[in-house]
């Protein structure tokens, strides 16, 4: 959050989302017994922030697009690395949460085009 306005700096949020697939691999390989759980908790907390911003009418198109792209990258990573293959179900659940915020067509957010793989 910024001190001046009290609003969430979505630039930073997008940066965190952009690192999600790297953290999926890092968390899972550095901590085989709890890394996947740690990654899942962190990713879900990021999505919690997106949901809160959406509900307040403050979620930016670039931020939901970054989340969609992160989800896609995590799905690819989970499919490519046997060690993190279990993450596919977690990624699917996160994608469902994100899709719930999109317009009816599932490809736009408030009329703007969202990254869709």
Image (cartoon, rainbow, N blue to C red):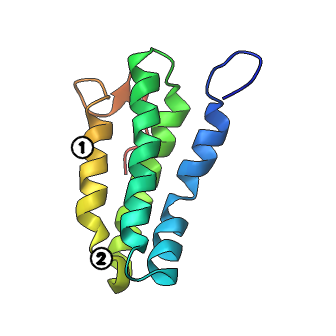
Which disc is residue 96 wearing? 1
Under tag 1, what secondary structure? helix
Q: From this viewpoint, which residue is outermost toward the right?
A: 4
Identify the residue shown where x is 44% and y is 15%: 56
Residue 23: % across, % down:
52, 66
Q: From this viewpoint, which residue is outermost toward the front?
A: 34
Which disc is residue 55 wearing? none
Mark 1 to mark 2: distance in Å? 18 Å
Under tag 2, what secondary structure? loop
Q: Quadrant of the N terminus?
A: top right
Which disc is residue 85 wearing? 2
Mark 1 and mark 2 lie on one chain; the one further toward the N terminus is 2
* In-front residue for pair 110/50: 50
Identify the residue shown where x is 46% and y is 68%: 24
Residue 111 seen by the camera: no
Report crowding for label 2: few under 14, some 14 to 19, many 20 or more residues within 10 A (C-alpha): some
Residue 32: % across, % down:
41, 83
Residue 88: % across, % down:
27, 66
Residue 89 seen by the camera: yes
Identify the residue shown where x is 42% and y is 26%: 52
Quick check: 55 left or right of 96?
A: right
Residue 41: % across, % down:
39, 55
Q: Is residue 69 shown above or below 32?
A: above
**Occupied quadrant, residue 6:** top right
Q: Is residue 10 shown above or below 38?
A: above
Identify the residue shown where x is 49% and y is 73%: 27
Circle 1/circle 2 CB separation < 8 Å: no
Quick check: 40 left or right of 25?
A: left
């Amino acid at each position: 959050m910024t001190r001046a306005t009290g609003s969430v700096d979505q630039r930073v949020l997008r940066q965190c989302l952009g690192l999600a697939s790297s953290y999926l691999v890092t968390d899972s390989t550095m901590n085989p017994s709890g890394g996947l759980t740690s990654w899942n908790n962190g990713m879900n907390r990021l999505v919690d922030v997106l949901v809160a911003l959406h509900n307040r009418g403050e979620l930016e198109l670039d931020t939901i697009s970054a989340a969609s792209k992160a989800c896609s990258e995590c799905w690819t990573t989970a499919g490519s690395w046997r060690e993190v293959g279990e993450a596919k179900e977690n990624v699917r659940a996160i994608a469902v949460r994100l899709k719930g915020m999109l317009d009816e067509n599932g490809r736009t957010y408030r009329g703007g085009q969202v990254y869709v793989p």
